[in-house]
Amino acid sequence: MVCADKTKVWRSPSERGYDIGEMDASIVCTHMMLEAWELGIGSAWVRGFDSQQMAKAFDLPEQVQPICLLPIGYPSDKSVPYEEWHSTFRPLSETVEER
């Protein structure tokens, strides 16, 4: 589990309510995934969970917010990517807008 400590995150002095806790945790998780892959270990970014229930289950302090889970393990020789998610791409025009 990768978390952000809301008492230690950088807060924008110009944009009220904006902090980079989630962004920093995301960067850390990405680096963890890359290092795991370098070691031959597979991983999957998981965000589909109730962060309040997760915090309660792990008895986290109130200021510590779960951002994502990173299950890791050695992939099976028989494992293959889920076809629908790894071979279907949206046109660039649906994801990029020029102004």
Image (cartoon, rainbow, N blue to C red):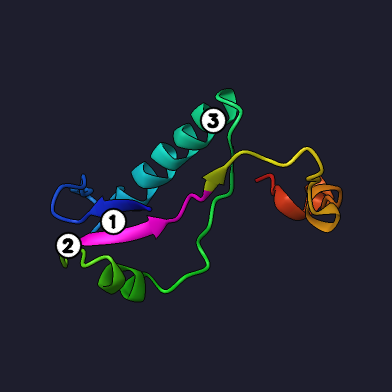
Amino acid at dot 2: Gln
Amino acid at dot 3: Leu
Q: How far apart are marks 1 and 2 (CA)?
A: 16 Å
Q: Distance between the residues labelled 3 and 2?
A: 28 Å
Q: How far apart are marks 1 and 3 (CA)?
A: 28 Å
**As rendered, which of 43 and 62 lies closer to the eye?**
43
Residue 94 is situated, as x and y percent measured from the top left of the image, at 77, 55
Residue occupied by mark 1: 18
Mark 2 lies on a secondary structure that is loop
**How many other residues sit within 10 Å of disc 2, few (<14), some (14-19) or many (≥20)?**
few
Residue 17 is situated, as x and y percent measured from the top left of the image, at 24, 61
Q: Quick one: label 3 or label 2, which is nearer the N terminus?
A: 3
Residue at left 73%, top 42%? Answer: 76
Mark 3 lies on a secondary structure that is helix
Q: Quick one: label 1 or label 2, which is nearer the N terminus?
A: 1
**How many other residues sit within 10 Å of disc 1, few (<14), some (14-19) or many (≥20)?**
few
Q: Is residue 97 left or right of residue 62?
A: right
Residue at left 55%, top 24%? Answer: 39
Magenta residue check for 12: no
Q: Is residue 57 left or right of residue 82?
A: left
Residue 7 is situated, as x and y percent measured from the top left of the image, at 13, 54
Residue at left 52%, top 36%? Answer: 33
Q: Which mark is residue 63?
A: 2
Q: Which mark is residue 34?
A: 3
Compared to residue 61, the image places residue 99 above or below, namely: above
Q: Quick one: label 1 or label 3, which is nearer the N terminus?
A: 1
**As rendered, which of 7 and 32 lies closer to the eye?**
32
The segment highlighted magenta reads: 63-71
**How many other residues sit within 10 Å of disc 3, few (<14), some (14-19) or many (≥20)?**
some
Q: Which of marks 1 and 2 is in front?
A: 2
